[in-house]
Image (spheres, rainbow, N blue to C red):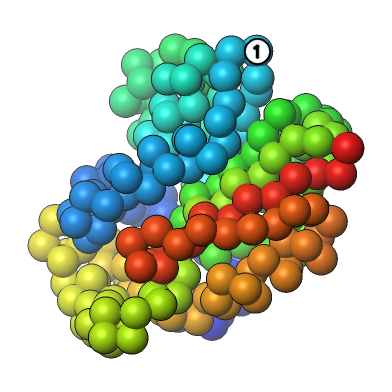
């Protein structure tokens, strides 16, 4: 599966990321020129979870993003539908079975989350919502498992707002990104998919409307790195 306009069947996307898991964090650092670390800090600040709160980190992959929440004193669960990603995360966190120290790793599909209603103070998903088969269904599931008044934070690739930079960025996405990924030993098919899925993803305002239609309130967004990614936040009605 390399074309973003294919049907995003969960088992196909999961298998693709399984093949990428071992080098995933390294390649993300390289292809983002280190910006991914700044993005993680921005998400952690927006989630603003502290001691006594519980965060669900969806599309967590190897749990690198999840560490940002536990560092602030919150409890956090890392969930992903790629077993390869989760297994890599467990090993890197020194855990056994599917548990790392302080971070449970849970296999789950964002459209059918294996958690009870009103379980989390905050739900977040970073650069993974594009990979979900049905965006609206996933956003409603996130609302279901969030406590009334709780918050949602989404980080996703978006549309660059500075036209000259946008032209350079699109050339990089389609021509260079898969080649860079291959140099660092990752699965080039995955990064062809990544480039195409970014190009086909809706802009900031369109995603905000989709989030609102799923029942979230006070939806707003903030561009990071000129809109290479955008961070959307919303709240579940109290």
- Check the picture and name the quadrant holding the N terminus: bottom left
Q: Residue furthest right?
A: 238
Q: Residue at x 57, y 19 (%)?
A: 50
Counting labels gives 1
Q: Residue furthest left?
A: 183
User: Hey, which quadrant is residue 75 in on the image?
Assistant: top right
Q: Is residue 166 above or below residue 47?
A: below
Residue 113 in view (yes/no): yes
Q: Residue at x 27, y 52 (%)?
A: 35
- Check the picture and name the quadrant holding the C terminus: top right
Answer left or right for 55 relative to 144.
left
Answer left or right for 18 relative to 53.
left
Q: Is residue 156 above or below residue 193?
A: above
Answer left or right for 140 relative to 187.
right
* Residue that label 1 marks: 52
| Camera-side residue of 54 and 183 | 54
Q: Position of residue 26 (x, y in %)?
A: 22, 46
Q: Is residue 19 above or below residue 163?
A: above
Q: Residue at x 58, y 26 (%)?
A: 49
Residue 115 in view (yes/no): no
Q: Residues within 10 Å of mark 1 (few under 14, many from 20)?
A: few
Q: Position of residue 80 (x, y in %)?
A: 55, 43
Q: Is residue 183 above or below residue 116?
A: below
Q: Position of residue 124 (x, y in %)?
A: 59, 43
Q: Residue at x 41, y 77 (%)?
A: 161
**Regarding mark 1 in the picture, which secondary structure is present there?**
loop
Q: Position of residue 63 (x, y in %)?
A: 43, 33
């Amino acid at each position: 599966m390399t074309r973003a306009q294919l049907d995003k069947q969960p088992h196909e996307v999961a298998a693709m990321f399984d093949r990428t898991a071992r080098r995933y964090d390294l390649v993300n650092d390289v292809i983002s020129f280190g910006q991914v670390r700044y993005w993680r800090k921005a998400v952690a600040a927006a989630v603003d979870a502290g001691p006594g709160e519980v965060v669900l980190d969806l599309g967590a992959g190897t749990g690198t993003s999840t560490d940002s929440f536990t560092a602030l004193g919150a409890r956090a669960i890392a969930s992903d539908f790629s077993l390869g990603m989760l297994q890599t995360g467990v090993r890197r966190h020194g855990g056994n079975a599917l548990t790392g120290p302080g971070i449970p790793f849970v296999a789950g599909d964002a459209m059918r989350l294996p958690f009870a209603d009103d379980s989390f103070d905050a739900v977040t998903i970073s650069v993974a919502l594009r990979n979900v088969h049905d965006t609206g269904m996933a956003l409603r599931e996130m609302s279901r498992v969030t406590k009334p008044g709780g918050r949602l934070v989404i980080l996703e690739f978006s549309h660059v707002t500075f036209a000259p930079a946008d032209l350079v960025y699109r050339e990089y996405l389609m021509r260079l990104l898969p080649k860079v990924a291959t140099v660092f030993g990752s699965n080039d098919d995955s990064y062809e998919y990544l480039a195409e899925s970014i190009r086909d993803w809706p802009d900031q305002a369109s995603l905000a409307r989709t989030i609102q239609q799923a029942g979230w309130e006070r939806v707003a967004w903030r561009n990071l790195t000129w809109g290479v990614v955008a961070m959307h936040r919303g709240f579940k009605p109290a």
